[in-house]
């Protein structure tokens, strides 16, 4: 997995609560059997004026000039500023894949949907929870200052603002370690294969009805 | 020491390891697989040279992409017109073959929506941990199983290790006391719950649904409720095991038989929360207060009684909420203050893992029997949840009732619930749908979804606008 240590980048504000996974990546793009290439279709239904198709030439499609992603001042953004319950809806990991593929490395929001939150960590994307008033203030600052960027320092659990002030954030220690070291979950779990095997044989005795096949 | 919730009990029984910060490995009894969220996971296994930990714990069926017209289905894979969808379905077949995983292929009579098939086959059993790369895996909690949706990386993790890495959730009890009024269904209960706690109300919790009204539901009805636990933000929903649960499971193909059935049933009878269990949150509703529900916006929490009105954003004091309402109404092409009954419909969709079981189809058929769909309704689809549901419905003559009323009777699959196949809602069209999500574009680009119960959808098909099913007599 991609490592995450420090990231400095332009902040893109998505001022909308309950952004669901259909909003992040519409379902027609879920037909792909690959993991990459979803970035051009991130926020597809809002970013373009027509309906996107998996094999379309996106460079020829009409852009929606009102959508924040198309505003030149946010070009190259790698930090997404969002509202409550970001990523609600389906379990599709295509949502973090699309965000990652577009170039986002971190998300700041007051709250996330559980499955999405979890999926981010598996893909080197850091979702940070900040209090609602802090998020509100960030929206104002981003709006007022073109080129506004933040530095996110995961090992120190700090966000450094352009004016030098620092915001601290919480992150679960195990997930932090995985991100900082770029560890693969499966590899970690397989180190405990003996424990799994031991559990399994005991469980087979306690609840044999879960192990039958007709 | 205080007692335990059902969630606590199932969690503890499956705990393989717990790290200091609470990150735990829990053992997974069943893994359900469909074509959309699995290809990258199998590819990951292959790249790492890994094999499934326990191939016999996995069960697959394609559902999201497959066509639902009889002609297309009769042609098998060749009937899938969209080449990208076809590759996805054939990739599932190939992966199952390569890794020796049991699959109900698209032309198997038992194929269907994965969350309908699991319980129907007895693949879902009480007290199990079940995962699937699909958020509506919460459905299986209706049988007293701990069932979560997972992402593709976790699909790969479960395939490779038979475990899920997770932190324990908090416990929420949603108690629905009293009795439902006639014409009010499980779908109305769960929409009312979401209307009350909001789409993020259950985030971080496992919700157990209890109370007299839940106990009185059939297992099918309980599945409708648990199915939408995710729409309330909860990854898993649960209903305690009782005689209704056991009666439902006994005799199903993959359920234990003979002496093992007796032992299992005795163990499963213990799968209830203790009287003195500690809840982190409790929500109470009175079933008698619940009326048939209709969503008017682009989130399941934007819901009202059929006799209510669409909220007027100018009356909303909270700035964020007002903006949300305005955005939703703009997308839906609706005005605040309009009566729900005055919403005109162009389409009706009866199906999805929320409401495509035999009981749902019976309720819908009862409403349309001997009637005709309104001329203004261009398209009305009835899509059974599985081949076996379809067979049962046909044995009862329900297909004929639907067709006589002008509704189309289709082959099983997800269909217009998320419109990954050809069943799509047109831009600007309003659809009364028995599915679970009314997000922008969910049923088709620009489509406008109103979530309702099967009986309410059927009544809307006949009248061309929403009506209170209780007025139909
Ligand atoms: S019916 Fe709809 S919600 Fe259910 S699994 Fe299929 S697409 Fe998902």
Image (cartoon, coloured by chain):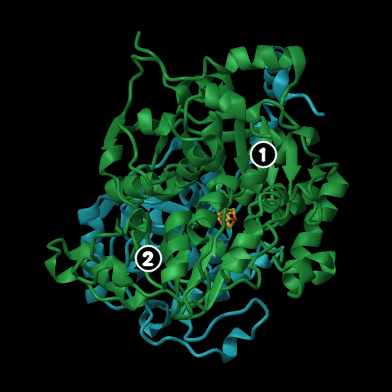
Chain colours: A cyan, B green
- Contact (Cβ within 8 Å) of mark 1 with mark 2: no
Q: Which residue is mark 2?
A: B298
Within 10 Å of disc 2 (Cα), the crowding (few <14, some 14-19, many 20+) is many
Q: Is residue A146 above or below residue A20?
A: below
Q: Residue at x 34, y 39 (%)?
A: B180
Is residue B200 visible in the rendered image? The answer is no
Q: Quadrant of residue B339?
A: bottom left
Q: Position of residue B235 (x, y in %)?
A: 47, 42
Count of residue discs: 2
Chain letter of the residue carrying label 2: B
Q: Nearer the viewer, residue B270 or B317?
A: B270
Residue at the top extreme of this rendering? B1
In the rendered structure, find residue B120 and report the number of the disc placed on it: 1
Q: Ligand 1 lies in which image quarter?
A: bottom right
Disc 1 vs disc 2: which is toward the camera? 1
Residue sitting nearer the eye, B259 or B96:
B259
Residue B282 position within the rendered picture, expressed as x and y whole percent measured from the top left: 29, 31
Place of residue B181 in the rendered image (x, y in percent of width and height, measured from the top left): 33, 42
User: Which chain does the numbered disc 1 sit on?
Assistant: B
Marks 1 and 2, the one that precedes in the sequence: 1
The 10 Å Cα crowd at callout 1, few under 14, some 14 to 19, many 20 or more, is many
Q: List x then y, in percent, for residue B332.
A: 36, 74
Along the horizontal axis of the image, is B220 left or right of B75?
left
Horizontally, residue B316 falls left or right of residue B246, namely left
Q: Are marks 1 and 2 on the same chain?
A: yes
Q: Nearer the viewer, residue B97 or B410?
A: B410
Q: Quick check: can you spot residue B224?
A: yes
Tell me the CA gap for discs 1 and 2.
31 Å
């Amino acid at each position: 997995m991609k490592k995450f240590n420090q990231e400095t980048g332009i902040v893109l504000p998505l001022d909308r609560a309950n952004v669901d996974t259909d909003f992040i990546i519409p379902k027609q793009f879920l037909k792909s059997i690959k993991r990459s290439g979803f970035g051009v279709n991130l926020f597809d239904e809002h970013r373009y004026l027509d309906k996107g198709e998996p094999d379309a030439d996106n460079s020829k499609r009409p852009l929606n000039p009102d959508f924040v992603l198309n505003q030149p001042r946010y070009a190259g953004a790698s930090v997404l500023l969002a509202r409550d319950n970001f990523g609600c809806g389906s379990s599709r990991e295509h949502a973090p894949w699309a965000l990652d593929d577009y170039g986002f490395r971190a998300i700041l929001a007051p709250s996330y949907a559980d499955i999405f939150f979890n999926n981010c960590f598996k893909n080197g994307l850091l979702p940070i929870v900040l209090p609602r008033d802090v998020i509100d203030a960030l929206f104002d600052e981003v709006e007022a200052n073109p080129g506004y960027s933040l530095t996110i320092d995961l090992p120190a659990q700090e966000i450094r603002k352009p004016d030098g002030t620092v915001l601290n954030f919480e992150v679960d220690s195990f997930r932090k370690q995985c991100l900082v070291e770029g560890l693969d979950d499966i590899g970690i779990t397989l180190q405990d294969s003996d424990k799994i095997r031991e559990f399994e044989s005991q469980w087979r005795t306690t609840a044999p009805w879960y192990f039958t096949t007709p | 020491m205080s007692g335990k919730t059902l969630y606590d009990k199932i969690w503890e029984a499956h705990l393989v390891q717990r790290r200091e910060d609470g990150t735990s490995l829990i053992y997974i009894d069943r893994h359900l697989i469909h074509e959309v969220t699995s290809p990258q996971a199998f590819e990951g296994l292959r790249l790492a040279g890994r094999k499934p930990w326990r191939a016999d714990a996995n069960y697959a069926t394609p559902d999201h992409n497959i066509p639902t017209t009889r002609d297309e289905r009769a042609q098998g894979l060749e009937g899938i017109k969209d080449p990208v969808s076809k590759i996805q379905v054939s990739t599932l077949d190939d992966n199952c073959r390569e890794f020796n995983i049991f699959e109900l292929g698209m032309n198997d009579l038992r194929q269907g929506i994965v969350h309908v098939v699991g319980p129907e086959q007895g693949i879902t059993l009480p007290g199990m941990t079940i995962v699937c790369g699909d958020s509506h895996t919460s459905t299986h909690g209706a049988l007293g199983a701990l069932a979560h949706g997972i992402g593709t990386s976790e699909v790969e993790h479960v395939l490779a290790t038979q475990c899920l890495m997770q932190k324990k959730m908090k416990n929420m009890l949603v108690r629905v006391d009293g009795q439902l009024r006639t014409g009010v269904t499980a779908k109305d209960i769960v929409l009312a719950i979401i209307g009350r706690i909001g789409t993020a109300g259950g985030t971080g919790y496992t919700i157990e649904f209890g109370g007299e009204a839940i106990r009185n539901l059939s297992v099918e009805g309980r599945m409708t409720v648990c199915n939408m636990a995710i729409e309330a933000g909860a990854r898993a929903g649960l209903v305690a095991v009782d005689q209704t649960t056991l009666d439902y499971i006994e005799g199903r193909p993959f359920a234990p038989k003979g002496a093992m059935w007796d032992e299992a049933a005795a163990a499963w009878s213990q799968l209830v929360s203790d009287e003195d269990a500690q809840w982190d949150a409790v929500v109470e509703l009175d079933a008698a207060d619940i009326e048939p529900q209709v969503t008017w916006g682009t989130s399941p929490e934007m819901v009202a009684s059929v006799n209510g009105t669409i909220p007027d954003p100018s009356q909303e004091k909270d700035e964020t909420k007002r903006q949300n309402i305005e955005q939703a109404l703009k997308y839906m092409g609706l005005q605040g203050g309009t009566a729900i009954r005055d919403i005109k419909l162009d389409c009706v969709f009866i199906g999805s893992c929320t409401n495509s079981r035999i009981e749902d189809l019976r309720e819908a058929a009862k409403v349309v029997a001997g009637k005709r769909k309104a001329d203004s309704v261009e398209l009305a689809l009835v899509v059974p949840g599985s081949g076996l549901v379809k067979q049962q419905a046909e044995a009862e003559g329900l297909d004929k009732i639907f067709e006589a009323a002008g509704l189309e009777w289709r082959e099983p699959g997800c269909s217009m619930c998320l419109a990954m196949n050809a069943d799509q809602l047109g831009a600007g069209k309003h659809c009364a749908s028995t599915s679970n999500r009314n997000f922008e574009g969910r049923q088709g680009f620009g489509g406008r979804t109103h979530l309702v119960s099967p009986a309410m959808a059927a009544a809307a098909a006949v009248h061309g606008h929403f009506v209170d099913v209780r007025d139909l007599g």
